[in-house]
Image (spheres, rainbow, N blue to C red):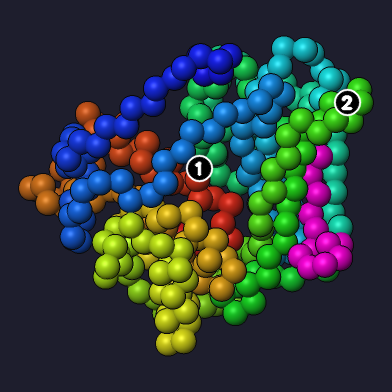
Amino acid sequence: PLGGGEENVLDIVVPRWGSGTYLEQQDHWYLGGIFRTVGLARREAGEDLLDVVADCAADGTIEVRLDLRDDGGGDGRRRVAATLTARGAEGKVLWTEERPADAAPVREGERQHRQTKNPPDFIRSDAPGITRIALSGRADGVAQWSAETPVLYDLAVELHSADDGVVLQREVLPVGFRTVTVEDGTLRVNGRAITVCGVNRHEHDDELGKAVTVASMEEDIRILKRNNFNAVRTSHYPNHPAFYSLCDSYGMYVVDEANLEAHGTRPMGALVSSPPWRDAVVARASRMVARDRNYPSVIAW
């Protein structure tokens, strides 16, 4: 185990080809190496907040779903709180809720299909020792997020001790209030029909190849906005997380695409409809949804 003064070695191996290559037959320049930052995160004792899902609808309703690691100490020893604030110097509090971390733990083998108005989450299919908690309410007076009005708010989620109020863990994520529907064949955002003027974008820099900088991503979005585009398809894989944050801030709809392109096989689609490849295909799509579901800019998968 890491820590305790012990010496640890982290090895990184970059194979040029592997079984996953058959699912990555994208039409782009193939460049080897590591293109994004690789990090190792260490959680301190008590940092048991594992996942946050925020559903913020156009009418101001908000539902925050949390996954906590069960500390084995029984009910009443921890509390969770969620607070929504406006951005700016004042940071006005628009909604807050607090409750004990006393939801029933997820039993071993129980699938995590939450009974909410939302589709199932995809973090874990079997998760022993996980406590599931939901906080919900309405934030009055919030502005709707769209490509024309990309208004963002800050949602802070805290896990703290019920005895002395010490904050054990705090996570803050930007959120936008918007509702995406398809009605009678028409794509609508916040009840209004939209026209998608989009582009397919690869992560590629003319000098750095696949090692795209945040400045380069931002310049791409600026060029698109200047030319009246309002959408991007992440052809053909999930992009760097910073790109989605920029789309949230600038107002750019995103069609998020999993790293699944196997049309090079014959017949076309043979791999993705083959039972032995099911787990690999589902894992890639599930990881994309689990990582990117809180970005308001993502309107389709």
Q: What's the residue at 64%, 77% (across, down)?
A: 149
Residue 162's label in the rendered image is 2
Q: What's the residue at 85%, 49% (across, down)?
A: 96
Number of numbered discs:
2
Residue 290's label in the rendered image is 1
Q: Are marks 1 and 2 in contact (CB under 8 Å)?
A: no
Q: Secondary structure at mark 2?
A: loop
Residue 262 seen anywhere in this rendered image of the structure: yes
Q: What's the residue at 7%, 47% (across, down)?
A: 266
Mark 1, residues whose alpha carbon is within 10 Å: few (<14), some, or many (≥20)? Answer: some
First reached walking from the N terminus: tag 1 or tag 2: 2
Mark 2, residues whose alpha carbon is within 10 Å: few (<14), some, or many (≥20)? Answer: some
Q: Quadrant of residue 250?
A: bottom right
Q: Secondary structure at mark 1?
A: helix
Question: As drawn, which residue projects farthest toward the left?
Answer: 266
91 falls in the magenta region: yes
Please, what is the three-letter code of the amino acid marked with disc 2? Ala
x and y percent of residue 280 in the render?
Answer: 30, 34
**Horizontal placement of 237 versus 253: left or right?**
left
x and y percent of residue 111 in the render?
Answer: 53, 25
Residue 229 seen anywhere in this rendered image of the structure: no
Q: Quadrant of residue 119?
A: top right
Question: As drawn, which residue projects farthest toward the right?
Answer: 164
Magenta residues, as a range? 81-92
Please, what is the three-letter code of the amino acid marked with disc 1? Ala
x and y percent of residue 275 in the render?
Answer: 23, 31
Compared to residue 60, the image places residue 279 above or below, namely above
203 falls in the magenta region: no
Closer to the camera, 125 or 173?
Answer: 173
